[in-house]
Amino acid sequence: MKNILILFVSVLISLLGKGQLTEGINLPNIKTVQLFPAANQLGYPVLGLNTSDRLELHFDDLDGNVKSYSYTYQLCNADWTPVMLSSFDFIKGFSYQRISNYRISSVAFTRYTHYSAMVPDNNCAPSRSGNYILKVFINGDTSKVAFTKRFLVVDNQASIVAQIQQPFNGEIFRSWQKIPFQVVLGDQLQVMNHLQQIKAVILQNNRWDNALINIKPTFFSNKKLDFNTENEIVMPAGKEFRWLDLRSFRLQSDRVAKANYYARSTEIFVKPDVERFQQRFVYYHDINGMYTIETTESLNPFWQTDYASVHFTYIPPENVPFADKDLFLIGQLTNYNLNDTAKMVFNNETRVYEKTLFLKQGYYNYNYATIDQNDKKRAASYEFTEGNFWETENDYMILVYYRQLGGRADELVGITRINSLTGRKGIGIQ
């Protein structure tokens, strides 16, 4: 009976470890969660293994009182399934760390408590490379998770060279981008079966919802892997993101239609948006779907800025709702979540789509995307809202993972970044 019980527990743990872990906010009072490299709000959270790299963690608690928050880490494989290892195998020091730095909001109608931390702490740090989930929980109870955020720890043992090309396929020639790349593995990486031991992932503008995963190399020789297939390394290019400047609620920016000011709150109405897929492509500088918390009216943007209820409106062609499609407001401001938190609602009286978000002062990028209601993969598409244009400026990040023979976790051994305007090859469209 003892052996059967041990076997049952082992199988249960194995089954529980199969699900993918994602980013998310579990408590309604938690807002504006950010995790970024020190002093760089637009950077993706990446740490070098055994380096002095640090990430900044910021979030607000709208309850406005002081609570006991702590954080811990969960190591994941390349597909974001948790590894079957004890936390002692990937956390150096204590298994969790309390967040002790907080500040009550000042000069803001909305009362909140702003929490911050530098991650990792010397007493609680990742000890292996790979994908990590940062779990922030309350009152020392790891089952009471307030929110989760992704970050990466890299042990650079492979070099990656990439470029952006225009696809040869005539059907996507004018609307997609191709990202061929070559990986050179370090001598310390012993590869017997590159199809099983090496995994590559491509992210566009730091998004995981449309990431290219399980990319197979087209050529492998000694320590070099070439990834140059026409079908696996292409992505819809999208269009430059729409913008919204909320750095001041009083001085209304060009994208604000009007604002209502109340005794203890503010409402912002964004100018109605329309489709852009039939409009000619025009390049302008954007921040690729990200946002920054900043203000023109105070000193510290993290605890001296206010919140407002921001109303977005999208006018569909001829005021007719999309047939068999749902419309979503996407960007870092909704964490690219394709659920009700980002879903636009069609108003039958005004014949427009509407969505209200509670946003902090800052500068925001966003776009609109549709999802076919019959699509089980729930893939977001710009085809009917923004359009896809080869000339679009995008940031790409290529990740290379390695697993030892008999290993129990994927190691992140290489990262490179490339912008679609850098060294571009192809034919420009006039």
Image (cartoon, rainbow, N blue to C red):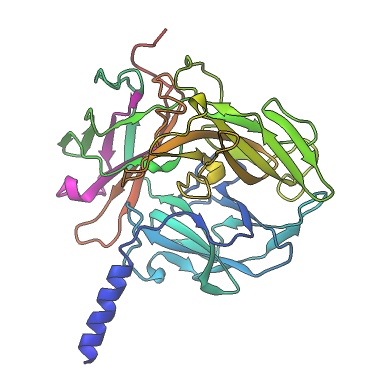
Q: Which residues are magenta?
A: 176-203
Q: Quadrant of the N terminus?
A: bottom left
From this viewpoint, is residue 41 visible?
no
What percent of the width, then of the height, locates residue 392? Answer: 45, 22
The answer to whether residue 198 is magenta is yes
Total numbered badges shown on the rendered structure: 0
Q: Quadrant of the C terminus?
A: top left
The answer to whether residue 189 is magenta is yes
- Determine which quarter of the picture holds residue 298: top right
In the depicted view, which residue is nearer to us: 138 or 370? 370
What percent of the width, then of the height, locates residue 325? Answer: 40, 38
Which residue appears farthest toward the right when viewing the image?
263
Above or below for 284 versus 98: above
Q: Residue at x 64, y 60 (%)?
A: 29
Q: Residue at x 28, y 69 (%)?
A: 15
Left or right side of 6 for 209: right
